[in-house]
Amino acid sequence: MAAPINILQVVQTYQMAGLAALQNLNCFMGTANTKFKNFDKITANLGDTVTFDLPPRFTSTNSLVVAFQPADQRVQPLTVNQQLSTAYEFTAQQFIFQAREYMERFGKFAIAEIGARIESNIAQNCVTNTYRFYGDGITPINSYNQLAYALAQFRTYGSANSRAKGYISDVVVPGIIGSGLNQFATTRNNEIANSWELGLFSNCEWYQSNLLPVHIAGNVGVNQATLTVSGFTNNGVAGAIDTITFLISGAPGVDGNAVFQYDKLYFLDGVAGLPNVRYLTFIGHQPSAAPVQVQITAAAASDAGSHVTVSIFPQLQVLPTNYQNITTAIQLNMQAKILPSHRAGLITAGDPFYVAMPQLPEEVPFPTANMMDPETGVSLRQYYGSRFGQNERGMVFDCIWGSTLVPEYSMAIIQPL
């Protein structure tokens, strides 16, 4: 493999400009739950997993005659399954005469590149690990009222008794701030006008990101076709529904791109002759105001009859068990829609966003160091050396990490593209 062609300057012809890196808003890494500090410090490899517990779930009966229920110890794994590196090399002459005094700048900007890639990967949890959401992917999020409604929808399902965290796109913040300045509330308006940041609102700390993930929806979502329930399968726990077959309006026929993994589906209200369906509270199993929204877990094609069968998370359970979660049974002819393509933000509470970045082993026989960058929060390995008998001096930065988000403690904020 041919060596890369370096573009270096003769030292006498330039001055260091002092330009800062074009930093990204790495709020996910900065606010993630790093509870597993010992896991971060040990030497690990790709595929290593740590498991943490989730609160158990129970049900209750209106009787003093007890019926024993299974004790289900719920857990969620955090697996180190991501890897990343950046590397560059010099000849001995380049290093001695042109690059030696510049190595700090090379290193700083290499780390910034890695930090942005890790932040972007962690942010994908907004799409992959959420099933509830606020927003329709068409109406812009541009007011405090919408943030208040999002938090109300998040909390009506059940929320950890702690300050929430919200993550929204940096480009929607000016519109939200502008809506707040138009309200007659002198003290608060002074605060947001002076900072031009959302900060703390409705017991939620708001963060801005320019790296929120984009989800591209299947054609059913893109075309905003109406789905009508034509069948379902009770394959889940105690007969819970985990797959549903829908008839797609508009007779699209065979479409290999009808539904994509991580599409978000929601049931419609007001279908003639059928009840509206709502989620029960996660703890206590009482009717809430939260609409029933689910994540599609696998891509699916429609058939010649314009039917599509989708696998969903969570399973929908009406029977009174630990996992009962809806107010009324799913019925034939209920209707639903899928969100169009969108950008996904996030609301969480209870620190359910976990990140682990364990150390990599030493790269023998090369000098190796494991360190953490204070600006990006990235823990990484650095090693360097030369190729024996060749005029090559190389520098490598690399790291491994894993992240996960507990779905029931989270809700996506859906913003139009």
Image: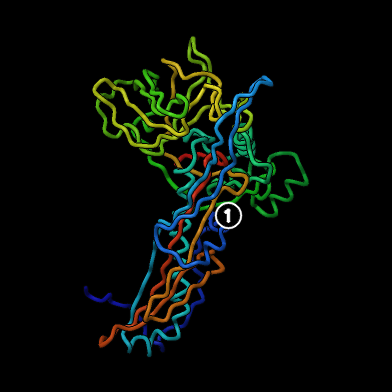
Using residue 293 as the reference point, say whether residue 309 is left or right of it: left
Image location (x, y in percent) of residue 185: 76, 41
Q: Position of residue 154 (x, y in %)?
A: 60, 36
Residue in the image at 62% along x and 32% along y: 283
Specify the quadrant that holds the N terminus. Answer: bottom left
Q: Is residue 159 left or right of residue 20?
A: right
Q: Is residue 66 left or right of residue 210?
A: right
Q: Which residue is under mark 1?
A: 33
Q: How many numbered discs sit on the rendered protein?
A: 1
When asked about the image quadrant of residue 30, the answer is bottom right
**Colour scheme:** rainbow
Indicate whether 214 appears above or below 137: below
Q: Residues within 10 Å of mark 1 (few under 14, many from 20)?
A: some
In the image, is residue 83 above or below residue 137? Answer: below
x%, y% of residue 118?
45, 59
Disc 1 on helix, strand or loop? loop
Residue at 59% of width from left, 57% of height from top? Answer: 35
x 72%, y 46%: residue: 189
Q: Amino acid at mark 1?
A: Asn
- In the depicted view, which residue is nearer to us: 388 or 89? 388
As drawn, 170 above or below 74: below
Which residue is the extreme one toward the left?
A: 1
